[in-house]
Image: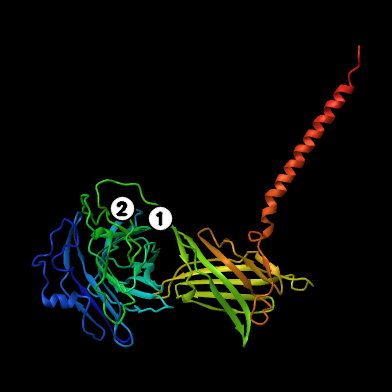
Amino acid sequence: MTASEVFVAPARPGRSPCPGVPAAAGSSSSSSSTTATAMGPRRSAASSRGRLLLPLLLLGVSGFFQSYAVEVDIKDASNATCLYANWMMSFLITYESNNGDYKNTTLNLSPNATHNGSVCGNDTQAALLAVQFGEGHSWSINITKTNETYQGDFITLTYNTNDTAVFPDAKRKGPVTVLMKDPAGPVQLNTVFVCHNYFVIEAENIKQIFWNVTVQAFVQNGTVSKKETRCPADRPTSAPTVPPTIANVTTAPTVPPTIANVTTAPTTTASPAPTPPKPVENPDTGNYSLKSGNKTCFLATVGLQLNVSQDKPLLININPKTTVADGACGNTTATLKLNDGNSTLIGFTFAVKNASASVQKFYLREVNVTLLNRLNGSVISSADNNNLSKWDAFLGSSYMCRKEQTLQINENVQVHTFNLWIQPFLVEANKFATAEECIADSDLNFLIPIAVGVALGFLIILVFISYIIGRRKSRTGYQSV
């Protein structure tokens, strides 16, 4: 990345960012050539620079608040656009005050927004769109790619309660990071996502409000596409539209196919029953290995999924294409460390049981999980369990379990494994040794219900025999008169 641009500007002329609120004074349906150059998606290449235009005052129920639009144009080594975004956003945050009360405050983008850390991404590395603003606040989303689509993965908001202008009496001081998983559908490559109307993301104590959004990741040939995918809020509807308010934004059940983890602002006056969330697909299976010198000493094939319990469960699939394996081999202990794009770290430690015995087994002893803020590397959450006794097999063999397994790390974090095949010791010729299968995979599983049925049959026969014997004894006990 040799050059990039960031602009901080008011909303697009001629369109009110809030339904039911008139557009800014002096705007019209056609933009001047100067404004089009500043805000349009296609511009000539330029070195890194920032531009500030006049802020737009939006009218909300609780009064006026100031919000700026951000335009980010990330360029690759050939100075061609690879990631483009233009959007407005605001955050409604509930925080605890010094006297124990909970208060609402609005955090808006500031004119000094920067985009340090934004990257283009490629087939093996996720793109990252990041902005920093105000007194220590930041927001980012990383975007993954397949052969045909791109899709948001994580959204990370860090707000700093030391900013007394926004949090004048916050009890907790310092940065607070909130991580969200994007459940929305993918967007086709070479297509720009557009959403002028409001949509909202809710997580924990925060409502993130977005509008006038234009995003395209993995831009092809340096040109932002003319092909658009519109959010549901922008599509025509016969139902009346209810203008949302910044003070109390609610969400409708439909989920737009956007780059953010979003739900749309309400489009009708009714309150329909919420649609169940789209289930998260099973993770892709990755192949990982470690070497000692030139010899492979650790082999692992596994699909990994994290279950992080916050206010709502957060499922995180580990992407093998962006995950790097590291660790160490040993005679009695071995460790595999997986790093998924500097945002998720998972460590597996194996040990040998009865190291002095003639027949030895290995087992999984410890798992630790760390979630990081990709922007600055700070720890969002960490968990460790060093008292496990799982996946045991004889030394010199491998352990296999194709069915899903769950490792409980602590009360808030679980690790789900799929298609597991692992050998942490005594790897020969870069190949897995004969596998010991888990009970869930065993072909003997069908014997369990048969055995239960046979046992019940014997029990019935015994009861019947006891009944017959009892009746015979009763008859012989009577004498004839």
Please count the marks in the image.
Answer: 2
Judge whether 99 appears above or below 373 on screen.
Answer: above
Q: Which residue is mark 1?
A: 277
Residue at (72% x, 49% y) in the render: 451
Judge whether 75 appears above or below 182 on screen.
Answer: below
- Residue 310 percent across, percent down from the top left: 44, 58
The residue sitting at the left extreme is 26
Residue 188 falls in image quadrant: bottom left
Q: Quadrant where the N terminus lies?
A: bottom left
- CA neighbours of label 1 inside 10 A, class few (<14), some (14 to 19), many (20+): few
The answer to whether residue 299 is seen in the rendering is yes
The residue sitting at the top extreme is 481
- Residue 392 percent across, percent down from the top left: 68, 66
Q: Camera-side residue: 384 or 338? A: 338
Asked if residue 182 lies left or right of residue 226, the reply is: right
Numbered mark located on residue 252 in the image: 2
- Residue 24 percent across, percent down from the top left: 12, 64
Residue at (16% x, 55% y) in the render: 20
Q: Camera-side residue: 394 or 134? A: 394
Local secondary structure at mark 1: loop
- Residue 371 percent across, percent down from the top left: 46, 69
